[in-house]
Amino acid sequence: MATKLVVENTAAAVALVLLDKDTIKRNQDGIRTSLLSLDRQIHDNAVQCMLHAEKHGDTSLMVRLLVNTIDKKTGYRRAGLINWMRKFSPMELSGDTINLSGTDGQGNKRPFLVDKANATPFWSDSDNNEMVARPVFKDTLMSKIDKAYSEFTSAMENTVNGKPVDPSKPFYDGIHGDKMADFFNAVKAMRDALPADETRQVRLTQERIKKDQEFLKANVAA
């Protein structure tokens, strides 16, 4: 039996009908199927746009896809698609236009790699993971420094004359081990001298409070 809930709205009270659990799950399955189908449809169309640009030197179709069809208002993973386009072609998005001036790290013009682009959908390439507005916290960065320090220290402890004491464990294979040790010790000293920063924990707490408030708002009658 459906349960009616009333949630507060700035304009007026809106009556909602709570669907049963199986219906909600079926709707979720339908959403996933639609998203997967949309991903494939967009990928296939983007490949055709890339082929067209390679053959005719005309980027207007890719512009239409990225600027007019999948614009910022859609909320779609546009940045990942743009990265995919740049990785496999010389196409560069500049404002509302796309040119063929893209170069690699050595300054060479990037080639069209349409076959590879077709075989590598943008959503499957980790290079295209969205990074927009993703915070980086001090403790996350410091943990990487701590890991590097620990790995170097363990490797040095297992190294004598450039050879491993225990062949089953990592060892340091390089010169200037003493200078490397000085470097890591200096970095660790500076790291230990940094003031405490609880920003990440604060953000996590704020997010939990926000979710609790949203739950209460959605489940407690006005």
Image (cartoon, grey):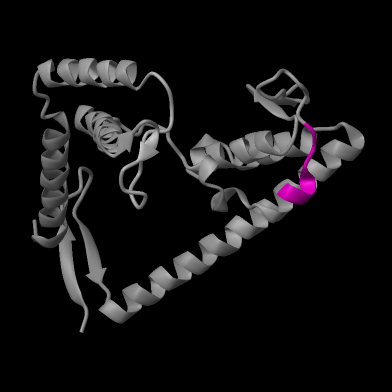
Between residues 34 and 85, which one lies in front from this camera angle?
85
Q: Picture coordinates of residue 124 (x, y %)?
A: 56, 53
Q: Picture coordinates of residue 1 (x, y %)?
A: 20, 84
Q: Is residue 150 left or right of residue 110?
A: left
Q: Picture coordinates of residue 83 (x, y %)?
A: 60, 36
Pick out the residue farthest to the bottom.
1
State the extent of the magenta-drawn residues as a range: 111-116
Q: Which residue is found at the position 83% from the left and 37% from the top?
A: 53
The answer to which quarter of the image holds residue 158 is: top left
Can residue 45 be seen here? The reply is no
Q: How many marks?
A: 0
Q: Is residue 31 left or right of residue 188?
A: right
Residue 205, compared with residue 184, is above or below; it is below
Residue 19, compared with residue 55, is above or below; it is below
Q: Which residue is found at the position 51% from the left and 46% from the top?
A: 126
Query: Any magenta on residue 110?
Result: no
Pick out the residue farthest to the right.
56
Q: Which residue is found at the position 39% from the left and 76% from the top?
A: 26
Q: Picture coordinates of residue 104 (x, y %)?
A: 69, 25
Can residue 38 be seen here? The reply is yes
Q: Tell me the quarter of the image containing the C terminus.
A: bottom left
Between residues 207 and 119, which one lies in front from this camera angle?
119
The answer to which quarter of the image holds residue 216 is: bottom left
The answer to which quarter of the image holds residue 97 is: top right
Pick out the residue farthest to the front.
161
Q: Which residue is found at the position 10% from the left and 45% from the top?
A: 209
